[in-house]
Image (cartoon, grey):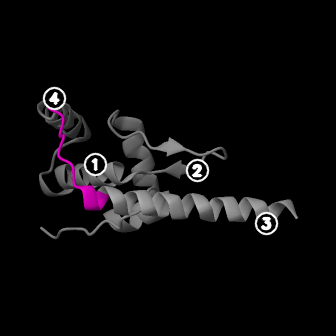
Amino acid sequence: MMTTLIPDKLFFKIGEVADLAGVEQHVLRYWEDELDALKPTKNKVGQRLYQKKDVVLILEIKRLLYEEKFTIAGAKNKLKKFKKKGTQLDFSYDRESFLEWKREIKNELESILKTLENTKD
């Protein structure tokens, strides 16, 4: 099994996720319809925005369906059982990672602010 390297981004568009997972976009939309666990957020214009956890879930769904040969119903049940097992919260805290994440968020927000200020002119 090959491990997919997921870029460190806040959000991914459907095309990026399709490329990462090696499936077509319509497959992702079908999985969304069939699997309750997969619900990406949508922006104001209805464009899907996947978070890193969604991408990890999609890779797991693909593994269940393509490698382990589960049906959609079987994968759905497996994901429910998997979710129930992971009920304990992970309180591990990596200060360096948090500070890096905080810097990235700040830079992104400053960039958005500059863009908005430039569009006022």
Amino acid found under the numbered disc labelled 4: Lys
- State the CA–CA distance, disc 2 to disc 4: 30 Å
The first of marks 4 and 3 along the sequence is: 4
Which image quarter: residue 16? bottom left
Crowd band around label 1 with a 10 angstrom C-alpha radius: few (<14), some (14–19), many (20+): some
Query: Which residue is more in the foreground, 50 or 88?
Result: 88
Residue type for callout 2: Gln
- For residue 47, which numbered disc appears in the image? 2
In the rendered image, is residue 12 in sight?
no
Identify which amino acid the numbered label 3 is placed on. Answer: Asn
- Whether residue 111 sits left or right of residue 118 in the image: it is left
Verify CB contact (< 8 Å) between mark 1 and mark 4: no
Residues at marks 1 and 2, CA–CA distance in whole angstroms: 19 Å
Label 1 vs label 3: CA separation? 38 Å
Q: Which mark is drawn over residue 57?
A: 1
Contact check, label 2 and label 4, Cβ < 8 Å? no
Q: Are marks 1 and 3 in contact (CB under 8 Å)?
A: no
- Spot occupied by residue 95 in the image (x, y as percentages of width and height): 26, 56
Q: Position of residue 110 (x, y in %)?
A: 60, 62
Res 118 label: 3
Q: Would residue 75 appear left or right of 85 to someone viewing this image? A: right
Residue in view at x 31 percent, y 65 percent: 6
Tag 2's secondary structure?
loop
Q: Quadrant of residue 55?
A: bottom left
Residue neighbourhood size for the residue with mark 4, other residues' Cα within 10 Å, grouped as few (<14), some (14–19), many (≥20): few
Segment tinted magenta in the rendering: 88-97
